[in-house]
Image: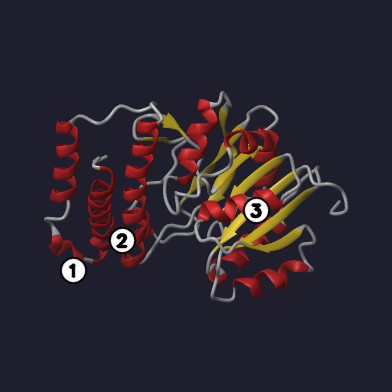
Amino acid sequence: MSNLEPAVSVVIPALNAAETLDEQLAALARQESDEPWELIVVDNGSTDATADVVRRWAERLPVLRFIACDRRGINCARNAGVAASRGERILLCDADDVVSSGWLRNLAAALHDWDLVGGRTETTSLNDPSTQRSRANPVSADLPKALRFMSYAVGASMGFRREVFDTIGGFDEAFTKGSDEIDFCWRAQYAGFRLGFEADAVVHYRLRSRPSEVLRQSYAFARANTQLYAKHYELGHLLRPPASEQRDVARRRLRSLVRIYRVAQPDHRLSYARNLGRALGVAAGFARHRIVV
């Protein structure tokens, strides 16, 4: 099957993913598909043993290819992976999650009905109870919405036809972390492409479990949300938030930091780190774009 032209390409961006990538590649090796497919891992400048992990899987997973992308940023890696791929349907997953056994087959099949599609994520398998309690499941039983506007597919479980990618010019590399897949899905929908949801394409999603990681991620996501709003406001698809609403958001973020004593309580450390990261990210976003969201 590996000698046939692939109908489906799976792209994984990877940056210092040696601790988790082995588990994801093992899950992909167990996938069942009636169609020829390929797997492309894109090294985005790793300094750990990511390359060694991929090489160990090269013989056991003949569909695997390993390429490098020196331009930093998840969207740079995604664009490089898609550019190197050959399938007309492209699936994305991440190096720190684990796809379920039917993920590839179900997500690829959904692209016969939809132009781009999101799968379902679940957070119980890879995370301890304390980490789970600190954050609700990032995806419900349907596609999430961002900024109370339009739905999007999470990049950890997303598929699209090559025509979508080519028409909208790929992923915007100005988004380095956070809101990257939202921007892609919104622009695809502006162009008239249809976005769907495939509940049977499940990814076991790994949450950040250390306060420092949670803080950095929350900061990046909050800052990117402002970048997203500013871009799509300039494109004419969003209205500028009323000043009163922006003040309310700022006050809520500041109020969430008052309970700093929770840092001393293990069960609340991750939640506090998330709130602190969001507050700092909102402030950074405002300094750059003069918008609070």
Q: Nearer the viewer, mark 3 or mark 1?
A: 3
- Mark 2 vs 3, N-terminal side: 3
- Mark 3 vs 1, N-terminal side: 3
Say which residue appears at 76% left-offset and 62% top-offset.
Answer: 61
Helix, strand or loop for disc 2: helix
Q: Amino acid at mark 3?
A: Gly
Inter-mark Cα distance, 2 to 1: 16 Å
User: Picture quarter containing residue 27?
Assistant: bottom right
- Mark 2 vs 1, N-terminal side: 2
Helix, strand or loop for disc 1: helix
Q: Amino acid at mark 1?
A: Ala
Q: Which mark is residue 264?
A: 1
What residue sits right under mark 3 in the picture? 81
Colour treatment of the image: secondary structure
Residue 209 visible somewhere in the drawing = yes
The spot of residue 194 in percent (x, y) is 58, 26
What residue sits right under mark 2 in the picture? 215
